[in-house]
Image (cartoon, rainbow, N blue to C red):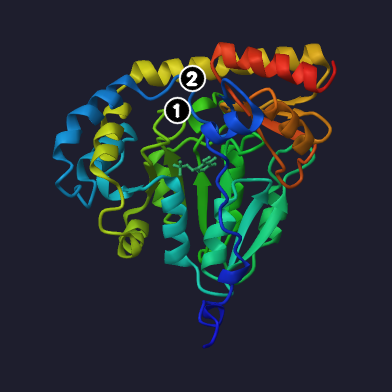
């Protein structure tokens, strides 16, 4: 019999499957730990919005019914929030789902995608499953975007251009002026996907702002998630804003019930929870100050950013990450181009203190 590998679509064998980290229980057993301080996934240290939790409880007795396949109420609430129309909103099973849907909608084998490096890995994953080629454009030395280099990478096959602001993992911003430069310089055949997963944590007046006129240009797609500021990563809800024209096509490749009932209800409630949103922002600002102060005290370089995480220079990120794990502190490292850094998600005050104390021991400071 011919091996199954022969029947698999070209390019699929080269994709490395996502390897999930060990569970808390496995880590505790492996390292003999009582507790894990999880600062590796840019989750919300304050937990989910309490209003969302209440909505989840209320929705549980209806689980025998399918969800609203169009996520109608949620799309209306999101549209109101952004002063747009529901037809300009698409929701997904996390923004990961939307990245995959955009890839399936726009990319043919041999097409090209431009993305910064380092940045969020799912953009390249979406390209790989469609057989598209990725142009990685390095950030500048100070981690700002190199718009000129991004535009120089454009070819007649370029279909998607990604920019993440604040960027994961550097937390640095793409400015509105840079968005305009990208739009002016790129062809009408390409779509600009602005991933704004962490934009709610930013306050720099030059950051990307979604004026309604931005979406008059059908080449603009903005992605958002309920996984960060709203603390609903486990439910999987993200959304995109774009012209109606874009979603009309994306809708053709979307699974009919891509966002579950509980997630839809919880996301509606979370959007109405201004107190939780505000507390999450304040927490991020205070945590950022704490880490910058501590980094200064310890003589470590910190990349000043505007997200719910910080990039710290420790010399060998992977080594520091492994050493921190022995203290029960999980961080991330190994992003291309920033191998000397660790990315630390802001935890509770207690978790942040544990992280810094552990870092001091690990680095013998
Ligand atoms: C920049 C960026 N975009 C998207 C996502 C995915 O978010 P979601 O949980 O909505 O799939 C993440 C998650 O870490 C992220 O960092």
Q: Is residue 101 visible?
A: yes
- When the figure is inspected, residue 355 is found, relative to residue 174, above or below; the finding is above
Number of callouts in the render?
Answer: 2
SS state under label 1: loop
Residue drawn 62% across and 58% down? 114
- Quadrant containing the C terminus is top right
Which secondary structure, mark 2? helix
Pick the front one: 111 or 270: 270
Q: Which badge, 1 or 2, is on the more N-terminal residue?
A: 1
Q: Which image quadrant is residue 237 in?
A: top left
Residue 191 versus residue 293: which sits nearer the camera? 293
Residue sitting at x 38%, y 18%: 276
Vertical side of 10 occupied by 115: above or below: above
Determine contact: label 1, label 2, CB under 8 Å.
yes
Nearer-the-camera pick, 27 or 157? 27
State which quadrant residue 113 falls in.
bottom right
Query: What's the CA distance linking mark 1 and mark 2?
Result: 7 Å
The location of residue 195, given as percent across then percent down, is 51, 44
Return the residue at label 2: 281
Task: Residue 48 in the image: state x and y as whole percent.
Answer: 38, 25
- Relative placement, left or right, of 351 versus 272 is right
Location of residue 240 with respect to 187 vertically, above or below: above
Horizontal side, residue 32 vs residue 76: left or right: right
Give residue 226's position: percent from left, percent from top: 40, 35
Give the residue number, with chain letter if any, for mark 1. Answer: 229
């Amino acid at each position: 019999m011919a091996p199954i590998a022969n029947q698999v679509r070209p390019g699929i064998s080269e994709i490395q499957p996502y390897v999930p980290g060990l569970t808390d229980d496995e880590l505790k057993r492996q390292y003999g730990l009582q507790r894990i301080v999880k600062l590796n996934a840019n989750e919300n240290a304050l937990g989910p919005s309490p209003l969302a939790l209440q909505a989840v409880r209320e929705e549980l007795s209806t689980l025998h019914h399918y969800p609203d396949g169009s996520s109608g109420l949620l799309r209306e609430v999101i549209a109101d929030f952004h002063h747009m129309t529901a037809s300009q909103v698409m929701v997904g099973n996390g923004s990961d789902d939307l990245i995959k849907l955009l890839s399936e909608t726009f990319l043919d084998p041999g097409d090209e995608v431009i993305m910064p490096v380092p940045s969020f890995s799912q953009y390249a994953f979406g390209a790989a499953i469609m057989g598209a080629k990725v142009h990685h454009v390095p950030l500048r030395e100070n981690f700002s975007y190199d718009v000129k280099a991004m535009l120089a990478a454009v070819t007649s096959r370029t279909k998607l251009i990604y920019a993440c602001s604040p960027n994961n993992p550097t937390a640095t911003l793409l400015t509105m002026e840079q968005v305009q430069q990208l739009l002016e310089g790129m062809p009408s055949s390409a779509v600009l996907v602005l991933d704004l997963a962490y934009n709610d944590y930013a306050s720099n007046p030059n950051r990307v702002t979604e004026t309604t006129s931005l979406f008059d240009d059908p080449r603009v797609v903005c992605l958002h998630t309920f996984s960060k500021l709203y603390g609903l990563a486990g439910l999987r809800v993200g959304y995109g804003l774009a012209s109606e024209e874009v979603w009309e096509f994306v809708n053709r490749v979307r699974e009919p019930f891509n966002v579950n009932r509980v997630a839809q209800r919880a996301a509606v409630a979370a959007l109405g929870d201004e107190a939780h949103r505000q507390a999450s922002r304040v927490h991020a600002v205070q945590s950022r100050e704490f880490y910058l102060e501590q980094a200064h005290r310890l003589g470590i370089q910190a990349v000043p950013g505007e997200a719910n995480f910080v990039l710290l220079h420790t010399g060998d990120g992977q080594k520091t990450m492994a050493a921190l794990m022995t203290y029960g502190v999980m961080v991330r490292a190994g992003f291309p181009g920033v191998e000397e850094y660790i990315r630390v998600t802001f935890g509770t005050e207690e978790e942040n203190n544990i992280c810094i104390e552990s870092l001091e021991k690990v680095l013998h400071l």
